[in-house]
Amino acid sequence: MASFVGVPIIYWFRIVVTLFFLHFYRTSLSAHEIETQASHFFRSGHTNNWAVLVCTSRFWFNYRHVANTLSVYRSVKRLGIPDSHIVLMLADDMACNHRNPKPATVFSHKNMELNVYGDDVEVDYRGYEVTVENFLRVLTGRLPASTPRSKRLLSDDRSNILIYMTGHGGNGFLKFQDSEEITNVELADAFEQMWQKRRYNELLFIIDTCQGASMYERFYSPNIMALASSQVGEDSLSHQPDLAIGVHLMDRYTFYLLEFLEDIHPASQSNMNDLFKVCPKSQCVSTPGHRTDLFQRNPNSVLITDFFGSVRKVEITMSTMKLNPNNTEKNEIDVNEEMVTTLQHYVDQLPVAEIIHQKPKQKDWHPPDGFILGLWTLIILIFFQTYGIKHLKHVF
């Protein structure tokens, strides 16, 4: 048998073939890992984000519903969704209500330090514009030609849409302004029209109302995930009572949802399973629910920022980019100058985690008008009972 360096040729052949297959396996494994990482990065498949935020209640005693909606509005803006991609519907203007002791503000905590109304709120539908018809027209795109872009949901088949609703509801319906209501069947049909017209890629529906889970029972369109603050037969309770204005400032579920979102930043890896744990029954009193059977992806792989954040455009290039400053420009920069590198990180817009756990300050409290009126009435009655009308001349 022929040999090379004392070793038969057949053994050299086997060694070469083995090395070849090992190299091929490692190359294919590396390609598979790269493909897996790329698919993980682009796992959502959406290219833009939209939000439709709806408060369906009016009148001062429903202050908390406006605060609920504005709290979510503030969070999605902080995480990157611009006003041009948010449709905000408020049935009443609590900031300008004559009963508001602090005009042009809406607070979500009794410390009165976190103003969720802010300085740059863009309300698209307000007051009596917030109707069932207008809401359904926004979702389905069936708006008059004269409707401005700011009042339209200009989504497409690559859009991830967050729909948040709050107000008074019951088993299978949600009231709009105490004059009309939308049923779970109408809502389900509107979502089906959106799917048929390719108006969304994935949709997250959140509702904070009594018996909220009944509103997603009739959903049948694909790629919809739904959350509710209460089950059928349960009430969704209010939170944060404030003696100064005489109403509750928020609902329990949205209060803890806001607390959860304050820890989220655009690069967070928190997923929907984390969101499902928000406000357990020990905190909400009611039982929050969720539905994921229509959603194609595993909730564990769905990031919070897939719906509450905005897509960051990334451009991939194979060419070399020169990052050093150009010395030929007028304002020359010495490339040899020592550069100080600072660690970049995301910060909260306000220290909300500290604010929401503080006790209310004494200076923020003042007696309600009814208390003062009752006190003066009691003083006058005691005076008349003690001295009578004849001593009034000594008073006036």
Image: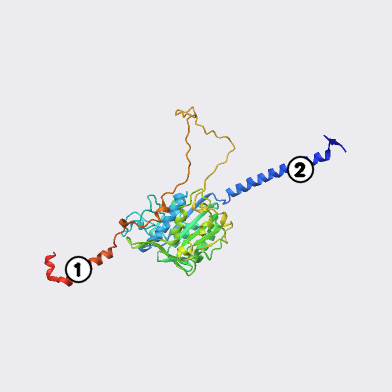
**Residue 130 in the image, given as x and y percentages of width and height:** 41, 60
211 or 176, nearer to the observer: 211
Q: Which mark is residue 18?
A: 2
Q: Can you say whether 196 is above or below 333 in the image?
A: below
Q: Where, quadrant-wise, is the N terminus in this rendering?
A: top right
Residue in view at x 27 percent, y 65 percent: 371
Left or right, 114 with respect to 36, comes to: left
Density class for disc 1 (Cα within 10 Å; few <14, some 14-19, many ≥20) is few
**Residue 203 in the image, given as x and y percentages of width and height:** 53, 57
Residue 56 sits in quarter: bottom left
Provide the residue designation for mark 1.
Answer: 380
Q: At label 2, which amino acid type do we have?
A: Thr
294 or 338, nearer to the observer: 338
Q: Which mark is residue 336?
A: none
Residue in view at x 58 percent, y 57 percent: 298
123 or 379, nearer to the observer: 379
The answer for how far apart the CA atoms under marks 2 and 1 are is 106 Å
Asked whether the viewer can see residue 148, the reply is no
Left or right, 206 with respect to 301, comes to: left
Left or right, 102 with respect to 303, comes to: left
Q: At label 1, which amino acid type do we have?
A: Ile
Q: Secondary structure at mark 2?
A: helix
